[in-house]
Amino acid sequence: MIQWSDELEEELAVLLKDWLKSQGKTQADLKRSLQSESSRMPSLLLILKKEHSRNGIPGIATLLCEIEEIWNRGDKTIQENELSLKENNFDPFGQLDLLLEEIREDCDS
């Protein structure tokens, strides 16, 4: 598993900013979806760091894919959905799905 580092954190911050811009969302939108205490990047990254400690980079990518799908459906947060996307075996086809595949390939090599 790839270890959490300052470099990884910086790359994730850039990725999040680009992703939010492409989705037409703000850090405040991501704050609500992650149920973070703050919309500041360090707070958002802290939640992703916790996810990384549980499930690694693939867990972060899966979480962000779920959020993207929820946004595409017009929902506010992951917790507001009655059924988890994982329980439904849902396969989102957003930009982050491609990222997840690349991350998995990198982890395998």
Image (cartoon, rainbow, N blue to C red):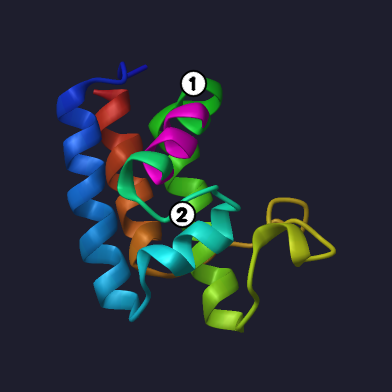
In the structure shown, which secondary structural element does the residue marked by tag 1 occupy? helix
In the structure shown, which secondary structural element does the residue marked by tag 2 occupy? helix
Tell me which segment is drawn in magenta.
Answer: 44-50
Residue 96 horizontal/vertical position (percent): 37, 59
The structure residue drawn at horizontal position 46% and vertical position 54%, both measured from the top left corner, is 64
The structure residue drawn at horizontal position 22% and vertical position 30%, both measured from the top left corner, is 8
Question: Is 11 displayed left or right of 96 in the figure?
Answer: left
Residue 103 horizontal/vertical position (percent): 30, 39
At label 1, the amino acid type is: Ser
Q: Residues within 10 Å of mark 1 (few under 14, many from 20)?
A: some
Q: Which of marks 1 and 2 is nearer the N terminus?
A: 1
Among the 4 quarters of the image, the one containing residue 85: bottom right
Residue closer to the observer: 85 or 104 = 85
Question: Is 95 displayed left or right of 11 in the figure?
Answer: right
Quarter of the rendering occupied by the C terminus:
top left
Q: Main secondary structure of the magenta part?
A: helix
3D distance between C-alphas at marks 1 and 2: 15 Å
Question: Is 106 displayed left or right of 24 in the figure?
Answer: left
At label 2, the amino acid type is: Leu
Name the disc covering residue 64, or none.
Answer: 2
Decide: marks 1, 2 in contact (CB < 8 A)?
no
Residue 42 horizontal/vertical position (percent): 33, 40
- Asked if 77 appears above or below 7 in the picture, the reply is below
Q: Is residue 63 magenta?
A: no
Q: Does the magenta stretch include residue 46?
A: yes
The structure residue drawn at horizontal position 30% and vertical position 19%, both measured from the top left corner, is 2
List the residue tagged with mark 1: 53
Question: Is 92 displayed left or right of 103 in the figure?
Answer: right
